[in-house]
Image (cartoon, rainbow, N blue to C red):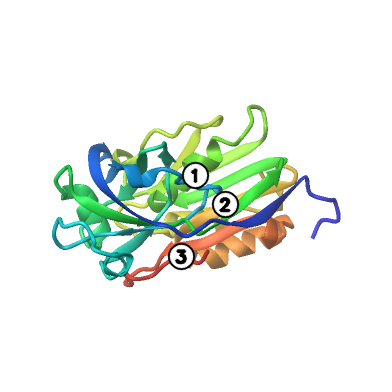
């Protein structure tokens, strides 16, 4: 590990855990298997998300009746997502939609406008305090919302690299970032395979820059090669986020916070 003091730290911050009942107000397909939805409602007053990698839980009812209680809402099928953007009475969320997805992606793809949905959290955040000397953002399509939020934090001129794996060129979406996004196409190969090969091919000389913040998130098998890269680059794990956002064959898997 490097003995040079880092210019930033990751701080844990808590938020009051609140549950909200809102409705689907808009849907925009950004790619054939990637959709952005807007949730709206007065319950969103006071909503906040301090960290770019935050997780909130969305609850999807079988019908269209508002929940009679928080307990009833929490009994609905649910999945975790990263808040993308929000205002006083609206919240934008993006979904990767595939044929074998659970209730969340199906709801995002096909629920009628006006459909009800529950929102829980976020309940805690990991916040970058200070200024990383460089940035390395790596993920699959499920990590695009977090990558969007991290990319918005990168100052112009600071060394950065953004690498995203999707199935094909048709699955690429626009990312507002100060550097060009490098897209990897896995084709018919297993999800994460292109990212794993990419990470395993990076050596010490490929470090993005000094004092990097590294974000690496995709299918669970990304964790081992991601942590191995941190070791090669001499990056302390406390200065990085490396996690499996989902796990092949486990629809109920939830990324660790």
Q: How many marks?
A: 3
Label 2 vs label 3, nearer the camera: 3
Identify the residue shown where x is 65% and y is 47%: 128
- Residue at 41 percent across and 39 percent down: it is 86
Residue 179: image location, x then y, percent:
55, 31
Q: x and y percent of residue 28 in the render?
A: 25, 36
Q: Horizontally, is 72 left or right of 145 in the view?
A: left
Q: Specify which label sits upstream in the sequence, 2 or 1.
A: 1
In the visual, does 32 lie left or right of 228?
A: left
Which class describes the residues within 10 Å of circle 1: few (<14), some (14-19), or many (20+)? Answer: many
Give the Cα separation between the discs numbered 1 and 3.
Answer: 16 Å
- Mark 2 vs 1: CB contact within 8 A: yes
Residue closest to the eye, 9 or 123: 123
Whether residue 98 appears in this view of the structure is no
Circle 3 SS class: loop
Badge number at residue 156: none
Residue under label 3:
255
224 sits left or right of 169 in the view? right
Q: CA distance from mark 2 to mark 3?
A: 14 Å
**Residue where numbered disc 1 is placed:** 147
Give the crowd class for mark 2: few <14, some 14-19, many >=20 residues within 10 Å: many
Give the residue at mark 2.
215
């Amino acid at each position: 590990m490097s003995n040079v003091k880092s210019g930033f730290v990751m701080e844990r911050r808590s938020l009051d855990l609140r549950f909200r009942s809102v409705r689907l107000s808009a849907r925009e397909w950004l790619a054939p298997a990637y959709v952005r939805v807007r949730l709206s409602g007065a319950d969103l007053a006071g909503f906040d998300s301090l960290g770019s990698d935050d997780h909130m839980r969305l609850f999807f009812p079988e019908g269209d009746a508002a929940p009679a209680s928080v307990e009833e809402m929490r009994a609905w099928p649910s999945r975790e997502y990263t808040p993308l953007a929000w205002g006083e009475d609206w919240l934008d969320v993006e979904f990767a939609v595939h044929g074998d997805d659970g209730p969340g992606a199906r709801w995002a793809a096909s629920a009628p406008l006006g459909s009800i949905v529950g929102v829980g959290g976020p309940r805690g955040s990991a916040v970058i305090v200070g200024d990383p000397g460089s940035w390395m953002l790596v993920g699959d399509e499920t990590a695009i919302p977090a990558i969007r939020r991290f990319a918005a934090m990168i100052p112009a001129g600071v060394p950065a690299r953004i690498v995203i794996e999707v199935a094909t060129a048709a699955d690429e979406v626009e990312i507002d970032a100060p550097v060009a996004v490098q897209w990897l196409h896995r084709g018919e190969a297993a999800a994460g395979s292109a990212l794993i090969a990419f990470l395993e091919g990076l050596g010490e000389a490929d470090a993005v820059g000094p004092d990097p913040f590294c974000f690496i998130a995709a299918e669970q098998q990304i964790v081992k090669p991601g942590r191995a890269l941190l070791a090669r680059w001499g990056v302390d794990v406390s200065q990085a986020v490396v996690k499996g956002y989902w796990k092949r064959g486990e629809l109920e898997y939830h990324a660790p916070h």
